[in-house]
Amino acid sequence: MEEISNQLRPTTRLMNLAIDACARANPVQQSLAFEIFEDGATSSGNNGKKGGRLSPNVFTFGSLLASCARNGDISLAVKLLRELEGGSYPDVTPNNVIYSTVISACERSDPPRVDLALELLNNATVALSSSSSNAGGLGVVGFNAAISTMARAAQWQMAVRLLDEMIMHSNSNMESIRHYHGEQKLLLHVLDDTSPSSWADGREGEMIVPKPDDVTFGTVLAACERSGEWEELLRIANAARQNGVALDGIALTSVLHACQQLGLAEVALEYLELMKELGDGEGDESANSNTVDRRTRGRMRKGARQALRGPDGVAYRLAISACARAPHGARWKEGIRLLNEMRDAALKTNSTAEAPDVVAYTAAIAGCSEAGEYTAAMRLIQTMRSEGIMPNVVTFSAVMNACASASAIMARRREEEDRSIELEDVKAPMNRALRLLEAMKSPTSSVRPNIVTYNAAIRACAEGLNLDVAFDLLRQLKEDGLEPTVVTYGSLMTACERVGNIEAASKVFRMVKNHDEEDGIKANEIIYGAAISCCRKAGEPERALLLLRKMISEKLAPNTATFNTVIAALSEAKPSFSSSTAKGSKETTSNTWEKALSVYKVMKSKHAPPGVSPNRQTYNILIRNLATNLQPGYAESLLTSMCDAGFVPDVDLYTLTVRSYERCGNPMRALGLMESMREVGYDFYDIKVLDEAFKNAVKIVNKVGKGFATETGSRRGYSDFCVGEEINLYHDDDDDDNDYQILDSLKY
């Protein structure tokens, strides 16, 4: 053995192979790697004799740093890099691999060293951009390592910023980078000509920053996904496509996840089609040889995750769920189509793991739920059972919600005077939901209803206009040992609202109050909103206003629809005359139109809850109310406000206001309003009612002349009351208690 040993002389290449083997071992043999380095490169030969000392090269240090990186030993990695930069090994100059490996050590350290990774990234960009031996600069691998460090540290914002800087620099658009980040300092501060780290001789234009590749984009997408930044994730995915970077299956799955969370069915279907194309270019090394080589080595490692060659079960489930979450269930048919496509794809590949499961079916049924397609949901249940897939409690709850939505759609159509719909048609879906609930409660059922199931059943009763059964279900769920939630009470309040039962609504409020004291359940915006709508249906505008005040005092945030409901309740109130008021007088004990205007003013003020502002419905309700109550001056002012807000008033709003002016004896104002209609594209000559009003007004003006404006007596006073002179609905004077006495009580 000694003779053989004497014949073998170690070489730098053999030393490098040994160190590399230590770095790749599992677990990493970092200490052994450095022992080999010390023994081969810095100590004497055999038997203490000098000679045979090995000369380490860049590959030696690359393997040593790899052992540090894989072990997360950032301190030793940086120490070794500083020695190389300081000239301790004159024959070795740090290259892109060296820097990239040290940055990778920042990612694997605990915790990840984002600050150090950025420092190393900037230093490497300067050093390698000026090196003739590193014509390509640091390269995308080093940048990807820095972005991975940010992602692992949950610094998704920094990862996005660095990616944006890479994109904009690759497009030679540094001004866009500075504009995009505003006053923020660039992460790649060496690119900023105001930075002290810029080129000493002003050669900042020669900085080399690589274009982001699929790994760059994939890492940032994964960081956004983990942080739930769905809109940003979709923006990054779109940027990848704009820059000609093809995303891999894992990245596309992240995009589908974002679409599912946001209910973007169209976008989900688009990216699912891109996923189907993954297998088409598999093995095409001419397109991107570097990426293919890198992936090939990774896929060859034992246990490495294989590349997706098309949509898998996860992708299909996400896409189906995205269709289910589309607004108003508009894409429920697409969800069922994808479910069938998923089944066909699994049959072709003979992969039962990728076949539709209970999650996929439940997602498709949820789409039917939003659309009110309860018969389609029932058919999917039958298909599930025929395929040996057992529905779970979530599946059955989704079916009940489909029944509830169907009843709601029927009831809405019936309210719109669709004479073909009978009350029994409204109740039919509800009855299906109740039968399903009874089947779940039977002794032979393997799936027992939970609180979500009961909530869905109560909602079905609410939409099916069956208040008594809704309250009975509350009793049943308590008997089953379940506790009502805020959703339960919200559905009960909706049941009260649908039939306009004020007493029942008060009962629900008392129940919530009792739970508030015991379990901390508080009435939320949904409960209050339904109660306010109930007051409107019951003709109780003052109660609706009181609930709005209470809602605001409890720091809840009523939305625009809730404000509109209160305005509508006040506008629909019948005038009540006091006993002291002469018969035929226009003065009432309570001018509800003034209160409606006060609520409107709160919506326009700084006290409005976030996101609340008057919409088209707000203006429509108020203008009709004011014109009907002979307040054309206020109505006209609101017509102007409506236009300023970007809404073009319907012609009938002008017609009502013109007629109101006529009834108040103010034809000149009516003429002025008709002339102003031209500004929004209306020609009153083409509108019969307004044309006749115009002709009548002209006759009156020609007959009376200028004396019209100097009328006296009771007619003058009544006219002024109707016109509302010196109207100003634009100011935001929150202290004007004389004109708006209830404003302070409505401050948010």
Image: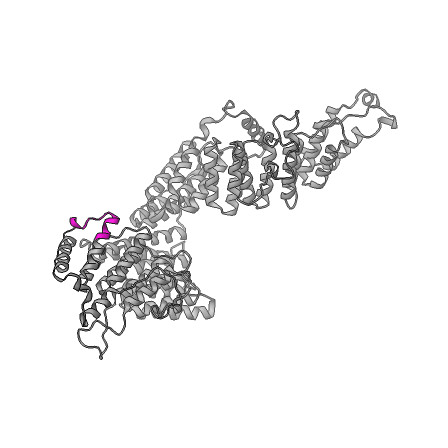
Residue 152 magenta-highlighted: no
Position of the N terminus by quadrant: top right
Q: Position of residue 369 (x, y in %)?
A: 34, 50
Left or right: where 348 falls relative to 686: right
Q: Residue drawn 72% across and 33% down?
A: 85
Main SS, magenta residues: helix
Residue 480 % position (x, y): 41, 63
Relative side of 268 to 112, left or right: left
Asked which quadrant contains residue 407, the reply is: bottom left
678 over 278 or under it: above or below: below
Q: Nearer the viewer, residue 506 or 389?
A: 506
Is residue 416 shown to the viewer in this render? no
The magenta region covers 675-686
Q: Is residue 724 above or below residue 278?
A: below
User: Is 127 located above or below residue 474 in the figure?
Assistant: above
Q: Nearer the viewer, residue 522 or 129?
A: 129
Q: Return the residue nearer the eye: 710 or 657.
A: 710
Please tell me whether residue 677 belongs to the stretch shown in magenta. yes
Depth check, front residue: 141 or 470: 141
**Position of 645 compared to 197: left or right?**
left
Identify the image quadrant of the C terminus: bottom left
Q: Is residue 85 visible?
A: yes
